[in-house]
Amino acid sequence: MNYSFYATLVWGWMAIGVATFFYLLRQDAPYGRHTRPGWGPTIDNRLGWFLMEFPVVVVFLLVLTRSETPVAGVIPLFGGCFLFHYLHRSLIFPLRLRTAGKRMPWLIVFSAICFNLVNGFFLGYFFAHFADYPADWWTDIRFISGQVLFWLGLGINWQSDNILIHLRKPDTTGYSIPRGGLFERVSCPNHFGEMLEWTGFALMTWSLPGLAFAVWTIANLAPRALAHHRWYQAHFPDYPKARKALIPFVL
Ligand code: NDP
């Protein structure tokens, strides 16, 4: 596939991401607290998370290792960041969740597998065939600021998910008001952190598939954070008034 055809596909994929953003603003994705009947057969929540997230590891590695030129320079680091996130998300995160007995629709699992496979393919293909970074990319401001954002975002995401997971005693499934960390400022710092992370990845890789992945992450998570925020306000009369939904002091 030549770059021009590849780029057309990625732009098309990004356009679908933008459309998805507007769709999700009107229709809350039906998993977690927004689960509701009418979305077809369901699957155990933890198994669903594993099935949604693990295939991207396989596809990314398969595509990347078919490169005809050695994968060198900054590219192994980019691949390492991507795989680090997804190995945690697919293998460790599901085991830590306290969602005993909860289920999610197969439709969500299937959509997420497609989303991850397409992103994993586009990123792996870019690194295997088109990426061409100068030798001094390590000192480029885009690389450095992207790295800072990526690890900062990952830290916020992990810390916030950790706080959420520990709100429940094992084998319970209720909800309470999260406190501590960035929860003092926003309802969904885990989503905010994830958005920072992939924005950083887009910046450090300075690539079209990196941008597409960041756009898709925002498309998935910004509407979800707004929906969570509304849900907290509707369910907890004492919900902190100054807390924003997603971006501290802004939104
Ligand atoms: P949520 O914040 O909805 O839930 C995270 C976990 O914490 C769930 O197990 C949830 O339980 C539990 N939880 C949340 N709030 C409370 C509360 N107030 N009291 C008790 N337990 C609570 O996160 P998501 O499920 O949306 O996402 C999980 C992770 O996956 C996040 O890190 C997110 O950034 C990432 N993600 C990334 C996407 C991307 O496009 N890159 C897309 C979607 C998610 P329950 O499930 O029962 O509600």
Image (cartoon, grey):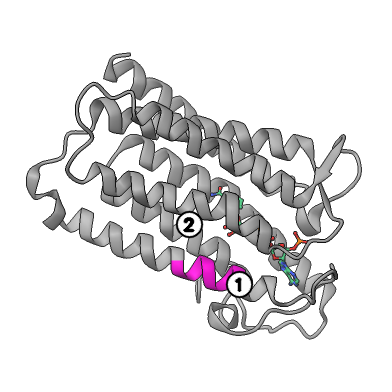
Residue 19: % across, % down:
58, 35
Say if disc 2 is inside 8 Å of ligand 1: yes
* Residue at the spot 27% in from the left edge and 51% down from the top edge: 204
Q: Nearer the viewer, residue 72 or 221?
A: 72
* Residue at the spot 42% in from the left edge and 28% down from the top edge: 62
Say which element carries label 2. helix
Is 121 on the left or on the right of 50, as rendered? Answer: left
Q: Residues within 10 Å of mark 1 (few under 14, many from 20)?
A: some
Residue 202: % across, % down:
34, 47
Is 192 on the left or on the right of 169, as rendered? Answer: left
Q: Nearer the viewer, residue 26 or 113?
A: 113
Main SS category, magenta section = helix
Q: Amino acid at mark 2?
A: Met
Tag 2 residue? 195
- Distance from the alpha carbon under mark 1 to that under mark 2: 17 Å
Say if 237 sits above or below 153 in the image. Answer: below
Q: Quadrant of the C terminus?
A: bottom right
Magenta segment range? 155-162
Q: Amino acid at mark 1?
A: Asn
Q: Nearer the viewer, residue 25 or 128?
A: 128
- Queried whether the magenta region covers residue 201, the answer comes back as no
